[in-house]
Image (cartoon, rainbow, N blue to C red):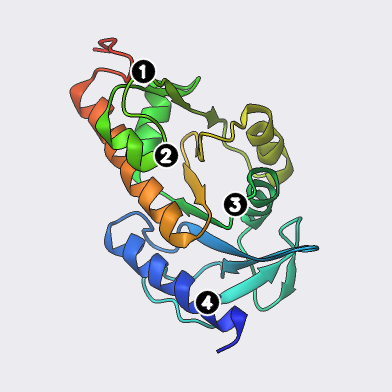
């Protein structure tokens, strides 16, 4: 199996998992893995397809700007995947439309604060005495603008970005690590939403 075929199979498997969780409804969301760094090349799930039905062939290779190098049509958001991979050094980026991050960004538009919650360890941070602020940026259709906003607020120890009224990006060294971080972060965001107490103990009712 070629590297691209292996990447396509892995991306299809992860997309099916997220679709089953209701995080990639319809054709929404996209996932990527880095194929090479010099020059930067990513395998990205193809645009406009049901993410629960992808095959290993439903993948597009893009460059550092998110433009297609080979394959079909990538999502316009491939450009933000590429920027995250370049700036954060990520090996994989997952973008889903889970509801909790979007609701949390609506409530905390300047960044979602989390602290003193055990599940933070699964997100790569300390469970106590470690304030984590998940950055939020405004939505838009220009990936360069979104990429600039991401880079301005980037912290190496916070591997996530919420795009307001849109969805969330989480990254890691590979797809498995990105998935684990996303699952833990989604739990954390649901906790602060359902308790109506933010991560630093303030009642937001």
- For residue 203, above or below residue 59: above
Give the residue at mark 2: 124
Callout 1 environment at 10 Å: few (<14), some (14 to 19), or many (20+)?
few
Marks 3, 1: nearer the viewer: 1
* Distance between the alpha carbons at the discs numbered 4 and 2: 27 Å
* Distance between the alpha carbons at the discs numbered 4 and 3: 17 Å
Question: Secondary structure beneath disc 4?
Answer: helix
Which is more N-terminal, label 1 or label 2?
Answer: 2
Task: Identify which residue is drawn at 51% across, 49% down.
Answer: 171
Which is more N-terminal, label 2 or label 3?
Answer: 3
Callout 2 environment at 10 Å: few (<14), some (14 to 19), or many (20+)?
some
Give the residue at mark 3: 90
Quadrant of the frame with the N terminus: bottom right
Q: Position of residue 127 (x, y in %)?
A: 31, 28
Question: Secondary structure beneath disc 1?
Answer: loop
Give the residue at mark 4: 8
Q: Are marks 3 and 2 in contact (CB under 8 Å)?
A: no
Marks 4, 1: nearer the viewer: 1
Task: Identify which residue is drawn at 42% across, 70% down.
Answer: 50
Which is more N-terminal, label 1 or label 4?
Answer: 4
């Amino acid at each position: 199996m070629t590297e691209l075929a292996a990447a396509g199979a892995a991306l299809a498997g992860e997309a099916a998992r997220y679709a089953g969780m209701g995080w990639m409804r319809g054709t929404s969301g996209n996932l990527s893995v880095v194929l090479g760094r010099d020059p930067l090349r990513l395998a990205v799930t193809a645009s406009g397809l049901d993410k629960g039905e992808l095959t290993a062939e439903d993948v597009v290779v893009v460059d550092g700007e998110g433009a297609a190098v080979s394959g079909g049509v990538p999502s316009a958001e491939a450009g933000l995947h590429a920027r995250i991979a370049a700036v954060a050094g990520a090996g994989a980026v997952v973008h889903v439309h889970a509801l909790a991050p979007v609701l949390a960004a609506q409530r905390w538009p300047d960044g979602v604060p989390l602290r003193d919650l055990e599940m933070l360890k699964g997100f790569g941070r300390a469970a106590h005495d470690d304030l984590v602020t998940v950055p939020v940026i405004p939505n838009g259709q220009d990936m360069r603008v979104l990429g600039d906003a991401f880079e301005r607020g980037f912290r190496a120890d916070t591997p996530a970005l919420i795009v307001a009224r849109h969805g969330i990006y989480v990254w890691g060294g590979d797809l498995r690590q990105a998935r684990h971080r996303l699952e833990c972060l989604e739990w954390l965001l649901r906790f602060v939403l359902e308790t109506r107490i933010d991560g630093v103990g303030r009642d937001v009712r």
